[in-house]
Amino acid sequence: MRIPRATYRIQFTPQFGFDNAKAIAGYLADLGISDLYASPIFKARSGSTHGYDIVDPTQLNPELGTNESFDALISEIQSQGMGWLQDIVPNHMAYTSQNDYLMDVLEHGPDSSYTDYFDLSWNVPFGDRQERILAPLLGDFYGVSLENGDIQLQYEQNGLTVNYYSLKLPLRLESYTKFIIHNLGKLTRTLGRNHPDFIKLLGILYILKNVPSEVAGKQRQDQIAFIKGLVWELYTTNELIHEFIDENLKAFNGEPGNSESFNLLDDLLKDQFYRLAFWKVGAEEMNYRRFFTVNELISLKIEEVRVFNNTHSLIQKLVEEGKFTGLRIDHIDGLYNPIQYLERLLEKMGDVYITVEKILEVTEDLPENWLIQGTSGYDFLNYVNGVFCETDAESWLDKIYHAFISTKVNYTSLVREKKQLILEKNLAGDIDNLAILLKNISSKYRYGNDFTINGLKRAIAEVLTVFPIYRTYITPEGIGESDRATIQEVIRQAKEQTPLLQHELTFIEKLMLLEFDNSLSQTEREQWIYFVLRMQQYSGPLMAKGVEDTTLYVYNRLLSLNEVGGNPGHFGISVADFHSFNQKHQATWPHTMNATATHDTKRGEDVRTRLNLLSELPEEWEEQVNIWSHYNQGHRKVRNGFAMPDRNDEYFLYQTLVGAFPFAEHEHASFVERVKEYMIKAIREAKVHTAWLRPDSEYEEACTSFVEKVLNPSISGQFLEAFYPLQQKIAYYGMFNSLSQTLLKATVSGVPDFYQGTELWEFSLVDPDNRRPVDFDQRRGYLSSIKEQIKTDILGLIQDLLKHKTDGRIKLFLTAQLLKARTDYLSLFQDGDYLPLEIQGTHANHIIAFARQLGNQTAIAIAPRFLTRLIQLGEDPLGESVWEDTHLQLPAGSSSSWKNVLTQQSLEIKETLSIGSALTHFPVALLVSGAE
């Protein structure tokens, strides 16, 4: 197995494809990256900017380049000694006309060769629901869309399709009869009954009416292709038949303003295996499983061996060829049986590096029986972020926040409220489906005979609402102790919240704990297990949508804590807990990934390092944020007595401005537009005044207008004059936080992951803002210059970097030096013990330090924090004058000869290391004993 030394995440897009990645491979290698970490590169929906909306996992995405250009990229990567970590998507595909597998199902229904590919109600065991597959993809009500002429029948070589803008859905074979016989009498008169082409057309109708029901699969598809070919031949060779079909198209497509003229098309659509519907219908009626609440992403039944084998065939081929050296599994919690999936994956892929995208709560551990290397790093991200948050400031920031918005907010209650909102507004149809499953099971038992669908639905909703983690991992083989404890605690809380549902909740607990009655048949046991595994697939989407995509846009006490996998109700992380977390990783997941920014994070890593400073400066923050609001009061609009934006959204905006305001003046204009777009997304996600399901254009316009005015110097000069001093102060200290964070990521247990562009300062906002193009030419130039100066005058270089911190080169220098150290001392950082070091002296609380030790070799990392109390604005945290008597004890048996591998300076140390001497030249330190 190839264990990455350091990964670098690339977001492939049609504008940044294989050739572009090939051009930067040398730069990444020079930086010290060992493995390119690629976003999904399989065939996706046309124009996809992220690659997760896959339409064919057995092909590379042609929009990224040819197979030859991919091979050339791989050759270049390998020539640089680098590996390839590939993000794969086993949970879902795009619901689009470009998804041939899905179109086959919509055209052929139960006779499709791919019906078992998708998680449809048709595939529910122990059920007989065969209603039409929902296609909730219309922008308005079905009747409105139809009578506006937005839904149109079209004919081309591949047959008849129903078109709605770019959406193109096939018609089932039986529908051709209705279409062809319409107005056939007119064709009889114009062409003549005895004309050979008319006789062919009658023959086609005869075949259509007499397709044997037992004909299915490939044989049926061949027959349909034959019939379509005959019709197309008549259409292209006989002018009268051409006119006849075109006239029928016109008749079926109706005339806007004439409601009756759409009856033909309406009747035809009712005959299909799918039901076109307004996209909002998907929130309340759903007969396929989606990715979270996204109608356009339909889930796969990856638990089916045939589906697994086919969708992983190209992945397996590329692993066997050595082109993929590692895999990152997207959204593993969406799978029916994650453990079974991982076992199959290992069987197929062999001894390959595997991590999973898994959200872990603060006190939650990754299941130890998963034969993988760890997570993709969200757990580390929240721990390292939290250690720069001053925990003692919690009550002060509570007071400031509640005073500003004029109300008190309890985070736990808010989470519950927002999860209930998502259940009611976005997942109602999914909960209905679970309730029907549970009703079918409960009705077979005397103690469940009186349960109603409504009661069961409320009980399921209550269980999911109080669920504290993304999901449990109960399997047909049984339930683990931690999952058992979780279920029991969830049911206890649910009963406390809804005492009238005691019996229903007791029954759900019995099922979830797999407490089978002895009298159960094998089929009944399988029904129980099916419900349990299905239930587990919905706690994750509810957490994601209720917490990450709703609560974290409403609870705005300190936005740096509102991150993917984070818990803003947990105010910061102690140094002891940070060390404990890393020691546990070294013992159980030594090669897990450590991220500080990803394509999913809500704020750039350096936005968070800035915002954490508000916990150090609560008094200043309170004073300034109220002054700013006073200056900007006139920019808010009023509707029915309520100001827009409201105080909570205004507070959100000020933190955003403080955290993301760019250093470079030429970026200010684009920053205004970026913040406006971000505010629209944020307030829609909050679902308070506006939402994706029910946009309020007046409120949204008021918010974007507020942003424009606030950031316009000619209008808001007074505000900006007051804003700049605190923002620049926070930006200054934030740079040091970022350097410390970078050091910690690269030296603790695990594999450091760098998101594209973050080797310089990174102030992006949530996607799509964090997928903006990266200026690699600038970075390549910076790195080349830095490496040359390291050879000749490293201390002079460092002085220059400190003098010009805002250009980001100092972060690039640190990244390159850290990755060089990981290369030079790879075994030490991959396998060495993690030893927390005790800090003593006046400023002990301002240092995070630990050692990595393997054999007779030791590395010590020293990362400062909370610098606002130690240095003045413009000063650097260097030397004894700053750190005074602060020191640490060397690990027992350490050598006296050390080298700071960042500055290349040698140190002679006995038992005690002065922090001031370690931080003489650079704001962080990495010392290695016996280094040459």
Image (cartoon, grey):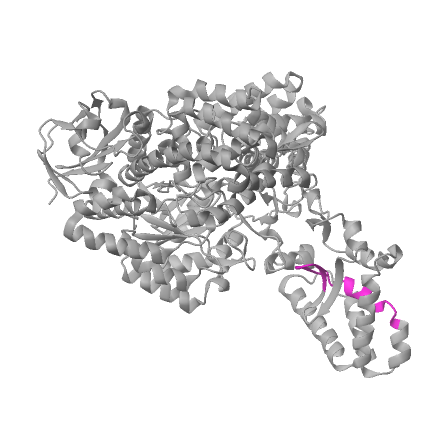
The percent coordinates of residue 197 (x first, y second) are 80, 81
Q: Which residue lies at the image location 78% right of the left edge and 72% below the top edge? A: 204
For the residue pair 525 and 378, the one nearer the viewer reads as 378
Taking depth in this image into account, of 124 and 596 the one nearest to the observer is 596
Question: Which span is picked out in magenta?
Answer: 161-184
Of 619 and 602, nearer the camera is: 619
Res. 521 in view: no
Q: How many marks?
A: 0
Q: Is residue 350 visible?
A: yes
In the image, residue 213 lies at what x, y percent? 73, 60
Q: Position of residue 45 (x, y in %)?
A: 56, 57
Q: Quadrant of residue 922?
A: top left
181 in the magenta segment: yes
Question: Can you give x and y, in whole percent of width and height, for residue 179 in the image?
Answer: 81, 65
The C terminus, quarter of image: top left
Location of residue 241 with respect to 294 vertically, above or below: below
Classify residue 421 as left or right of residue 319: right
